[in-house]
Amino acid sequence: MAKRQALGDVLDVLLSPTPVPASPPPAPPAARREPGRAARPVAVVPAPPPPAEEEELQGKKDRITVVLGAGLLDKARDAAFYTPGLSLTDLVAEGLRRELTRREKERGEPFPQRTANLRPGRKVR
């Protein structure tokens, strides 16, 4: 049975500033089995979410729209497609969670609550 790629590996590839060589997709199960043996059905059961994720799932969810480069979005869709049990939403949520944790650690404390809404549109440089 093929080894399932860990979610962290996929996110590391997507968030890496330098290109990481991608491994080829695994061969279909029929190509790996011995001649004369029937393929066994395989059930993909996603692992239970970690405790912080459980709290997040019970709360209200909001929909947002973001604009991403075509290459990044295509790479993310490929990762979700080739990772059993992973949705594009899961991938984005995990990446955002990791990046916020990294930035808070770099800052030395959690970000305070906003006092106003974000301004829509392009960021001012």
Image (spheres, rainbow, N blue to C red):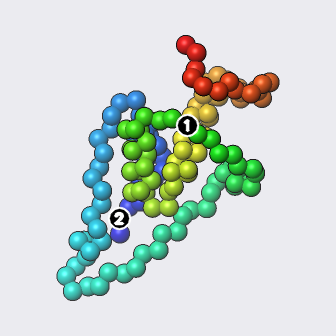
Q: Residue at x 45, y 53 (%)?
A: 80
Which residue matches tag 2?
Answer: 2
Of residue 39 and residue 81, the one placed in the foreground of this image is 81
Question: In this orientation, which residue lies closer to the viewer: 24 or 77?
Answer: 77
For the N terminus, give its image quadrant: bottom left
> What is the crowding at mark 2: few (fewer than 14 residues within 10 Å), some, or many (at least 20)?
few
Give the quadrant of residue 50.
Answer: bottom right
Q: Earlier in the sequence, mark 1 or mark 2?
A: 2
Which residue in the structure is indicated by mark 1?
Answer: 66
Q: Position of residue 70 (x, y in %)?
A: 40, 38
Q: Is residue 13 above or below residue 84?
A: above
Q: Residues within 10 Å of mark 1 (few under 14, many from 20)?
A: few
Q: Element at badge 1? A: loop
Question: Seen from this angle, which residue lies furthest top?
Answer: 125
Q: Nearer the viewer, residue 50 or 92?
A: 92
Tell me the kind of residue under disc 2: Ala
Q: Residue at x 21, y 86 (%)?
A: 36
Q: Nearer the viewer, mark 1 or mark 2?
A: 1
Hey, what amino acid is under mark 1? Val
Q: Position of residue 94 (x, y in %)?
A: 56, 45
Percent across and percent down for residue 101 are 62, 34
Residue depicted at x 37% and y 38%: 71
Residue 29 seen from this side: yes
Residue 104 is left or right of residue 15, and the answer is right
Residue 98 is at least partly visible in this image: no
